[in-house]
Image (cartoon, helix red, strand yellow):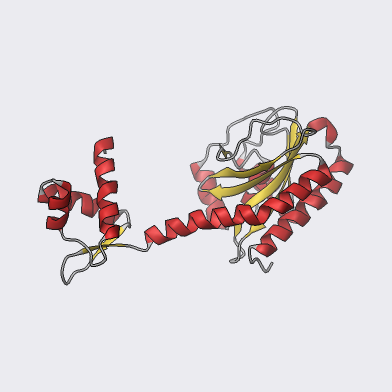
Amino acid sequence: MAIGSVERSLKILEYVVSCKNGVRVQDVSERMGISPPTAFKHLETLMKAGYICKESSNRRYHASYKIVELGSSILRNVQAREIARPFLVKLMEKTGMTVHFVLKDGDEGVYIDKVESARTIPTISRIGMRMRLYSTGFGKAILAYVTEKELKDYLSNVKLEKQTANTITDAKRLIEELERVRENGYAVDNEENEPGIKCIGAPIFDYTNRVLGAVSVTTAASILSDQVVETVAREVCHVAHDISERLGCKR
């Protein structure tokens, strides 16, 4: 679909949303200055996508609740960030490491917040940036708690490409790694996404007890010895638990 056509569909959607009693094909045609067949095509496309619905009795189109769901998702993400922020700051102060808060979005994670100090090492991450799940600490923490079907779909959709010499690119090995994550309650990115960088991630759950995202700490690999990993992981898990609890999780 051409950009101009997409823009017109969005304008039609905005028009439908603004009309309390719905719209007819003719209404859209006159409002947008397009032919009735073209108006019908746009409306049907929006309906197939789930953004509008049509009453069989009067053939009027109305906005669907999918619009509300999208708005709710945005608000939920904003709320989650606001709730998590003070916990992230405390975790940074306790560990002296860069702290990330990531939400799962499809087959990737999106950085929602990042807390660092003058002592933390610089990282390429930035708020809004999307990142792989299979090669990151936060990502493996998320994947360990998705449903069996979600994990199967993920492995079917995502190519496990090598990022470093340590990246797990075999699906069976990744599944075994995720089992260990569930046993420990946290995941470790052992220089799997970026050479010289290690991360520890723990899952965050929402009020439905579904995994929503994860919190993680990032630092130089030389700092995270096995003993340090266990100590820092406890702090990360505590913060993840506290954030989940504030989000209504009852796990």
Residue at 26 percent of width and 57 percent of height: 16
Which residue occupies the foreground of this view, 223 or 134?
A: 223
Q: Provide residue 94's location: percent of width, then percent of height.
A: 83, 46
Residue at point 24% right, 44% down? 8
Which residue in the rendered view is the most extreme toward the bottom?
57
Q: Evaluate whether residue 81 shows in this view.
A: yes
Task: Give the quadrant of residue 100.
Answer: top right
How many numbered discs?
A: 0
Residue 197: x and y in percent read: 74, 32
Where does residue 177 sit, x and y in percent of width and height?
A: 70, 46
- The image quarter in which residue 52 lies: bottom left
In the picture, the quarter occupied by the N terminus is: top left
Judged left or right of residue 87, residue 63 is left
Foreground pick, 232 / 85: 85
Q: Quadrant of residue 183?
A: bottom right
Describe residue 143's horizontal placement relative to residue 25 as left or right: right
- Residue at 56%, 53% in the rendered image: 78
Q: Where in the figure is residue 165, as x and y percent of width and height? A: 69, 27
Which residue is drawn at the image coordinates 86% and 37% (left, top)? Answer: 225
Q: Quadrant of the C terminus?
A: bottom right
Q: Nearer the viewer, residue 159 or 128?
A: 128
* Residue 174 relative to residue 34: left or right: right
The answer, for residue 181, to whether it is visible in the render is no
In this rendering, is residue 114 above or below 143?
Answer: above
